[in-house]
Image (tube, rainbow, N blue to C red):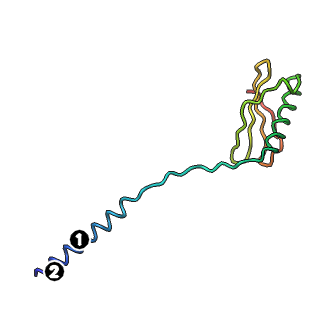
Amino acid sequence: MMPEKKNSCWALALAALLLSSCASTQSHPQFAQQAHTPVVQNAEMVETCKQEAAHRYNTRAQRISVLDLKQYQGSFEIKGSTTRQEGFTCSFDESGQFLHLSTT
């Protein structure tokens, strides 16, 4: 009866070792991937945004300040303001085509 007890102890020890190794998996942090748009496309979008805002606010494009450009899953947004502190947001689709200008 002694060899059976010894074998069952080894089996229990092996099972405990296997279970403990499964329970201690380390999770690795995941980082969102950000797609980078070409600088040329960004410059064209900024210029288009400035022209649209200049037309809307009846001013020159040189008086328009671009504050932020953000990329979302299927679109881009450019936030800006005029010298009179009138805020706006230009929206573009994923290919860089102008969609609309909204007041903020």
Residue 52 rendering spot, x and y as whole percentages: 86, 32
Q: Secondary structure at mark 2?
A: helix
Residue on which disc 2 sits: 4
Residue 102 disc label: none
Q: Can you say whether 12 is above or below 84 in the image?
A: below
Q: 59 left or right of 76? A: right
Residue under the image location 27 percent in, 71 percent down: 14
Q: Is residue 23 left or right of residue 85?
A: left
In the displayed structure, 97 sits above or below 87; it is below
Residue 104 image position (x, y, % from top left):
73, 27
Of 41 and 4, the residue lying toward us: 41
Residue type beneath disc 1: Leu
Image quarter of residue 51: top right
Residue identified by numbered label 1: 12
Q: Amino acid at mark 2?
A: Glu
Count of all numbered marks drawn on residues in the image: 2
Q: Secondary structure at mark 1?
A: helix
